Amino acid sequence: MNIYSLSRKDLENYFESIGEKKFKALQVYDWLYKKKVASFDEMTNIKKDIIQKLKEEFTMDKPEIIKVQNGKDVHKYLFNLKDGEKIEAVLMNHDYGNSLCVSTEVGCNMGCAFCESGRLKKRRNLSACEMVTQILLVEENLKMKISHVVLMGIGEPFDNYENVMKFIDIINDDNGIAIGARHITVSTCGIVPKIREFASEKRQVNLAISLHAPNDELRSKLMKINKVYPIKEVIKAVKDYLKINNRKVTFEYIMLKDVNDKEKHAIELSNLLKGLNCYVNLIPYNETSHIEFKKTDNKNIMKFYDLLKKNKINVTVRREFGSEVEAACGQLRSNYEEEK
Ligand code: SAH
């Protein structure tokens, strides 16, 4: 078992199970996440015999960084996991802080037509430690503190629900990495039962829905998942989420040239979202060499933006990061595999 997969509660339970006081969990958390030691032997306020037990029970392994691409305000990482699988994370420097986009799975089964990650079918879930250590490794590499985490890397977070929630518990812990819940965003392609389960947990974590189209006909062409959970069901689940969580929901909308970026789409989208406590995040599409979709030009993105505004929909345009560093989800990994 990797110790970075344990919430503080798990660690308390472990210490109690071996007849030790549970505050030891706090001490260990402090060594792992505040002092950031690399071995159990460095935890000098913990008795030798307990250190020995920890060593027998747990590892402190981290993945290995095998490639870093640095751009303006963006750093992209490729990691090699213990079993040789590769995943990515992207650090973005915003004026409000440093945000890390983490991966949640090796590959992805959602099969969205525009997405590079999905070209590799899902091979497995990431464990909580494989998500936590993305943060630790990037912080160490850049000597900076990560203030925001978005679960928008490779994978569908709600297809790896349990490990993702464990990951959130770990990084949100005040005695650990201490990233505030309001600074964490989970993004889903719209797995309705999991949206409902997530709602019932009443976390302060932000929810983002990858919508990308205002009607079922178009959305089903872009996102396979829409055939299972059509727009009406997604919106109903979001409405129910909003009844019990007082947090604005984000709808992500990738702007694809001549596909979903026309005036009629903006109007349809406005009608769909009218009255919901939400905002739309328009995402300039990151083109990739493997997929034929093109990016809407900025002038037309702004036209779309203005139309939503006029229709009283809260809307933002995502700042473009890293088109120079292969920043499309999954692009670094798939290009790396081709170069080999
Ligand atoms: N599976 C989750 C989270 C990972 S994808 C989800 O679907 O939300 C994170 C976001 O990046 C999604 O909105 C996804 O649609 C978007 N995305 C995928 N490929 C992209 C690309 N080439 N350019 C811009 N955004 C992309």
Image (tube, rainbow, N blue to C red):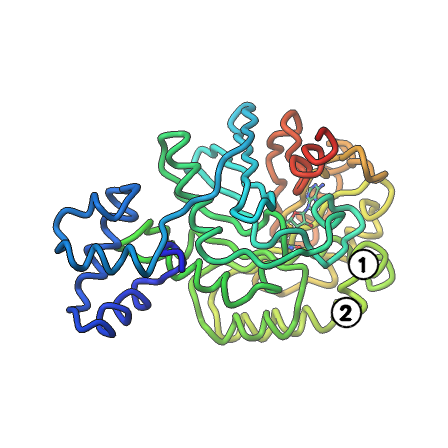
Callout 1: helix, strand or loop? helix
Residue found 51% across the figure and 54% down from its top: 185
The quadrant of the image that shows the C terminus is top right
User: Do residues under tags 1 and 2 come within 8 Å of each other at their CB atoms?
Assistant: yes
- Packing grade of label 2 (10 A; few <14, some 14-19, many >=20) is some
Q: 168 or 252, which is in the foreground?
A: 168
Rendered image: mark on residue 284: none
Q: Is residue 13 left or right of residue 212?
A: left
Q: Is residue 10 left or right of residue 273?
A: left
Callout 2: helix, strand or loop? loop
* Residue 313 on image: x %, y %: 64, 54
Up the image or down, 181 lies above or below 84; here it is: below
- Packing grade of label 1 (10 A; few <14, some 14-19, many >=20) is many
Res. 109 image quadrant: bottom right
Res. 19 image quadrant: bottom left
Marked residue nearer the N-terminal end (1 or 2)? 1
Q: 65 or 98, which is in the foreground?
A: 65
Up the image or down, 194 lies above or below 45; here it is: below
Q: Which residue is label 1 attached to?
A: 219
Residue found 72% across the figure and 57% down from its top: 270
Q: Is residue 55 left or right of residue 270?
A: left
Separation (CA) of disc 1 from disc 2: 8 Å
Residue found 43% across the figure and 63% down from its top: 166
* Residue 157 on image: x %, y %: 58, 59
Q: 274 or 242, which is in the foreground?
A: 242
Disc 1 residue type (three-letter):
Arg
Rendered image: mark on residue 230: 2
* Residue 136 on image: x %, y %: 39, 42
